[in-house]
Amino acid sequence: MKVKTIELSGIIKKEWDDWDKIKLVQSDGYKIDLVSRFREAIENYPNKKVQVNYWLSGKPCTKNEMTENFLKKLYGSAEAEYEKNDYRYSSWTSETDYDTVLSVGGHNLYSELSNEEGRFIILELNFQGAS
């Protein structure tokens, strides 16, 4: 089964202009409207099973760096340094539940990501069965 992956990243920022919005701010200042990008992806891959993965960090870094730091925490790696950044990994799956504006598998991503404003995120949307 083919999987189409769309990856988005940036600093999470909440904005309001008639609607509450979550944007991902790029290093050049460009802002990606997360809800619009989700809607566009859903329209391009209708009725496909979708899985959303995301990694959060206090500062921009790569997915490999986030995963490595997550595994270090998981396995109790000892470190001694003056600067420490927390990382978190989350993964949910959904069938075709697109009734909520930014929801996957009954999880309200809008609410969840709103609480992470100012943090860096790498977000993947994986559509199974996409050609």
Image (cartoon, rainbow, N blue to C red):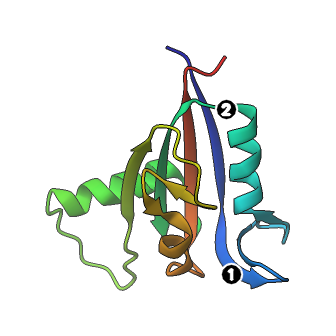
Q: Quadrant of residue 88?
A: bottom left
Q: Secondary structure at mark 1?
A: strand
x and y, in percent, of residue 121 in the image? 56, 63
Local crowd size for mark 1, using a 10 Å CA cut-off: few (<14), some (14–19), many (≥20): some
Question: Does residue 116 sit above or below 6 in this rendering?
Answer: below
Q: Please identify the residue farthest to the front as the structure is shown.
A: 99
x 57%, y 29%: residue: 48
Question: Does residue 89 sit above or below 59 in this rendering?
Answer: above
Frontmost of labels 2 and 1 is 2
x and y, in percent, of residue 68 in the image? 35, 52
x 60%, y 31%: residue: 47
x and y, in percent, of residue 79 in the image? 23, 71
131 lies left or right of 16: left
Seen from the viewer's position, the closer of residues 86 and 114 is: 114
**Residue at numbered disc 1:** 14
Amino acid type at circle 1 is Lys
User: The C terminus lies in which quarter of the figure?
Assistant: top right
Q: Secondary structure at mark 2?
A: loop
41 lies left or right of 91: right
Local crowd size for mark 2, using a 10 Å CA cut-off: few (<14), some (14–19), many (≥20): some
Seen from the viewer's position, the closer of residues 72 and 118 is: 118
Seen from the viewer's position, the closer of residues 76 and 103 is: 103
Seen from the viewer's position, the closer of residues 14 and 57 is: 14
Q: CA distance from mark 2 to mark 1?
A: 27 Å
**Residue at numbered disc 2:** 46
x 38%, y 67%: residue: 87
Q: Are marks 2 and 1 in contact (CB under 8 Å)?
A: no
